[in-house]
Image (tube, coloured by chain):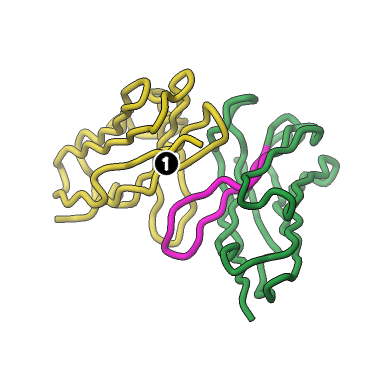
Chain colours: A green, B yellow
Amino acid sequence: EVQLLESGGVLVQPGGSLRLSCAASGLTFGNYGMCWVRQAPGRGLEWVSSISGGGELTYYADSVKGRVTVSRDNSRNTLYLQMNSLRAEDTAVYYCAKIGVTGKWFFDYWGRGTLVTVSS
Amino acid sequence: EIVLTQSPGTLSLSPGERATLSCRASQTVISNYLAWYQQKPGQSPRLLIYGASSGAAGIPDRFSGSGSGTEFTLTISRLEPEDFAVYYCQQYGTSPTFGQGTKVEIK
């Protein structure tokens, strides 16, 4: 059974940084692209970033480009999201999700999410 | 960016009734790369449909998807108590975007 477990969500001040992690199990991790999707409180879903199975290709939403870096360590079955210059509008639950098929970015497994709160 | 508009915002129905949810795209969705997700309060989204009409693994066959181009539909043939939730469409033909969601509530 595929399991994804996010961690690293905290309360951080505007302008601060943090790194989210997503530990994966139940799959051959390096075979699959992964992504981050966020959901602001009471709001809908927003795709944030994706990364290819080998980690060589990365993609970002315009809303976070230049402030966020996605990476992965396939030896540790772990996905990361480094977030810098955080803003109040980055407050959200951040989900990691597995990309269903290479080149087709629907998301077939999701973690339970980790809450990032940006506030002074 | 492709904008997805879901309607209605809220659908009030009784168990056993049929639910029809709409998702309209601002541009043609390439190759009908359209997915549907279900989200219950406090839970993460669950994939229901991909490729506009293909059911995800383990999804009951009362859930079906249809449509092409810019108009897509999710149909729940007979609502079960566990189906009352928020439903999102998502296109992945270009940089992924989601609709704003349709809440299916008990009437």
Where on the picture, by quarter, is residue A52?
A: top right
Question: Within 10 Å of the Cα at label 1, are there few (<14), some (14-19), or many (20+) other Cα atoms?
Answer: many
Q: Main secondary structure of the magenta part?
A: strand
Residue A93 position within the rendered picture, expressed as x and y whole percent measured from the top left: 56, 61
Task: Identify which amino acid the numbered label 1 is placed on.
Answer: Tyr
Chain bearing mark 1: B
Residue B101 position within the rendered picture, expressed as x and y whole percent measured from the top left: 36, 48
Report if residue A39 lies within the magenta region: yes
Which of the two residues, B11 or B2, is positioned nearer the viewer here? B2
Placement of the N terminus of chain A among the 4 image quadrants: top right
- The residue under the point 48% across, 50% down is A45
Which of the two residues, B39 or B73, is positioned nearer the viewer here? B73
Which of the two residues, B9 or B104, is positioned nearer the viewer here? B9
- The residue under the point 60% across, 71% down is A117
Q: What are the residue bounds of the magenta stretch? A: A34-50
- The residue under the point 55% across, 62% down is A92
Placement of the C terminus of chain A among the 4 image quadrants: bottom right
Q: Is residue A41 above or below residue B98?
A: below
Residue under pointer 1 = B37
Residue extending farthest to the bottom is A120
Residue B79 position within the rendered picture, expressed as x and y whole percent measured from the top left: 21, 42
Residue A31 position within the rendered picture, expressed as x and y whole percent measured from the top left: 73, 29
Residue extending farthest to the right is A75
- The residue under the point 38% across, 48% down is B100
